[in-house]
Image (tube, rainbow, N blue to C red):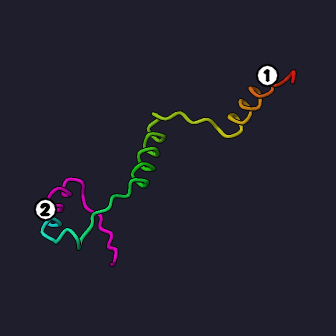
Amino acid sequence: MQVVTLEIADDFIDKFKHVLDAFPPEKVFLKKDRIKNEIEKRLSAIDGGEEVLTPYAQGMGDMRSRLQRKYADS
């Protein structure tokens, strides 16, 4: 089996699926790249300011402080 990657405009995908329906179902498979879609969604949320990110150094500092407060007297 060979893999062919197509980029199809969102407004045309429904019409294109009708073309795929003309092929025998055991010969042609439609796969969605869910990971790629999820990454793109998260990047858009970050760029749009919907997702708040903490810089690495600040996050590690906060974690270190919580651990020191919790286990300081151990």
- The amino acid at mark 1 is Arg
Left-right relation of 26 to 39: left
Residue 33 lies in quadrant: bottom left
The answer to the question of whether label 1 and label 2 lie on touching residues, with beta carbons closer than 8 A, is no
Residue 24 lies in quadrant: bottom left
| Image vertical order of residue 40 relative to residue 24, above or below | above
| Image vertical order of residue 44 relative to residue 51, above or below | below
Residue under the point 32% across and 73% down: 4
Magenta region: 1-18
SS at badge 2: helix
* Residue designated by label 2: 18
Q: Residues within 10 Å of mark 2 (few under 14, many from 20)?
A: few
Q: Position of residue 10 (x, y in %)?
A: 24, 54
Residue 8 lies in quadrant: bottom left
Q: Please tell me which residue lies in front, 27 or 63.
A: 27
- The amino acid at mark 2 is His
Residue under the point 45% across and 44% down: 42
Mark linked to residue 50: none
Q: Specify the quadrant that holds the C terminus.
A: top right
Q: Please tell me which residue lies in front, 12 or 33.
A: 33
Q: Is residue 17 magenta?
A: yes
Residue under the point 87% across and 21% down: 73
Q: Specify the quadrant that holds the N terminus.
A: bottom left
| Image vertical order of residue 25 relative to residue 39, above or below | below
Q: Position of residue 66 (x, y in %)?
A: 74, 26
Q: Position of residue 35 (x, y in %)?
A: 43, 54
How much space separates mark 1 and mark 2, taking CA atoms?
A: 62 Å
Which badge, 1 or 2, is on the more N-terminal residue? Answer: 2
Left-right relation of 39 to 74: left
Q: Is residue 7 magenta?
A: yes
Q: Residues within 10 Å of mark 1 (few under 14, many from 20)?
A: few
* Residue designated by label 1: 69
